[in-house]
Amino acid sequence: MPRVHASSRWPRLALVALSLAFAASIPRIAGAAGLEQVLVFLGRDHARILLLLDGPPGEVSTSSVAAVGSAPARAVLQIQGVSLAPRLQQAYRSRPGGTEMPVGQQGVRQIVLSGLGDGLQVAVELDRARTASLGEVGDRALLLDLRLPDSPADTSLPDPAYLAAWMAGTAAAPVPAEAPHPRPRIIIDPGHGGWDSGAVGCRDTRESDVVLSLSRRVAAALRRELDAEVSLTREDDRYLTLHERAAIANAQGADVFLSIHANAAPTPDLWGVETYYLDVASDANAAAVARRENEAVRRDGQPAQTADLVLGALVVSGTGALSSRLAREVQGAVVGRLGDLLGPGQTRDLGVKSAMFTVLVSTRMPSILFESSFLTNPDDEARLRTPAIQREEADAIARGVAAYLAASGSQP
């Protein structure tokens, strides 16, 4: 990892205009490392931004710029020998000079990514100027630390040691970048397995069994409809940690990650289909679902504090916008098909929601967690046990993935 240079220039405007000098489309530089993911952790008067690369960067420098006129305060990071990965570029809104990642919380407005010669500029727009310091996490990640002057560090934010442990445990750094896949590469993760049966239905249906059956049907549909390269994280009734599941997808450089589950509730009244992507919990029920699905991380042997810090502080993921789009396509396709098949009033659309799922935090590609139905509801359970319903649901999931790939330009 190269030496990092830093400077502080509060009253000067010179760097504010830098990002305006480049085209909206940021070309991929041949041989350059790619910025694959951006994770933002926000605290009181303190933010940390983790930049995950697929190779070591060149020389890096930082600077701080105060607000001048209508131009906001900024912390600016310039990285030589790095370009923006296409998947990250297409996930967010283009603007003259680069790509915008909105944040809009705790004084951090947005992150603007711009091409700069043979490198990349990362400009963090702020409500007030902050001191900027830069550190390294391993040899493929940079950690930008932003604090208001004279403010204490927020100890709730994950520190470099925790982030390094998390990255090592999830294979966050993928294999070196390769040519685009000639066929979509999709990882399907049947939830639970082995000693962890997951939810258990009214007729003793085990979540781990039924989602494995559904996942196999989804894999077959994706191969048939998309000629996709499809792998399952588990092919039989075995237990994998949440981080092992994500590591499989990261190591294979998957284009899409689908984690398939069946839901549960304290009473049999709740039923329907819902799909999740990674973000802060959209409501109390979403938070409860995430707590249930994340419970296994406490038994995985990883220190719980590490997982809690990463999950509890994460605000924005560099693939979050794509994951949201993927979730909406899959949810819409499944609800539409089941409605046509079962008739009026027999399908309940619980919508697309967000929550902090460990398995999604740890992936580096667009990822969703699909809750196929509630095993604790007798009618939902009966439908999910029916092979014909499974086939229709699997075909609909494949159609949703196909629509997402076509809309995002990822399908050959």
Image (cartoon, rainbow, N blue to C red):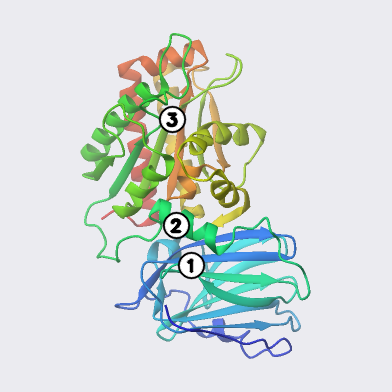
Q: Judge from the rendering whether residue 172 lies leftward or rightward of residue 318; answer left or right.
A: left
- Residue in the image at 74% along x and 70% along y: 127
Which residue type carries mark 3? His
Alpha-carbon span between mark 3 and mark 1 = 33 Å
Mark 3 nearby-residue class (10 Å; few <14, some 14–19, many ≥20): many
Q: Nearer the viewer, mark 3 or mark 2?
A: 2
Which residue type carries mark 1? Val
Mark 1 nearby-residue class (10 Å; few <14, some 14–19, many ≥20): many
Residue 142 sits above or below residue 281 on the image: below
Q: Secondary structure at mark 3?
A: strand
Farthest top residue in view: 203
Q: Nearer the viewer, residue 51 or 351?
A: 51
Q: Nearer the viewer, residue 137 or 36?
A: 137
Does residue 329 appear anywhere in the picture? no
Which residue type carries mark 2? Met
Which residue position is annotated with label 2? 167
Q: Mark 1 or mark 3, which is nearer the start of the sequence?
A: 1
Q: Which mark is residue 162?
A: none
Which residue position is annotated with label 1? 137
Percent across and percent down for residue 143 are 54, 69
Report which quarter residue 15 is drawn in.
Answer: bottom right
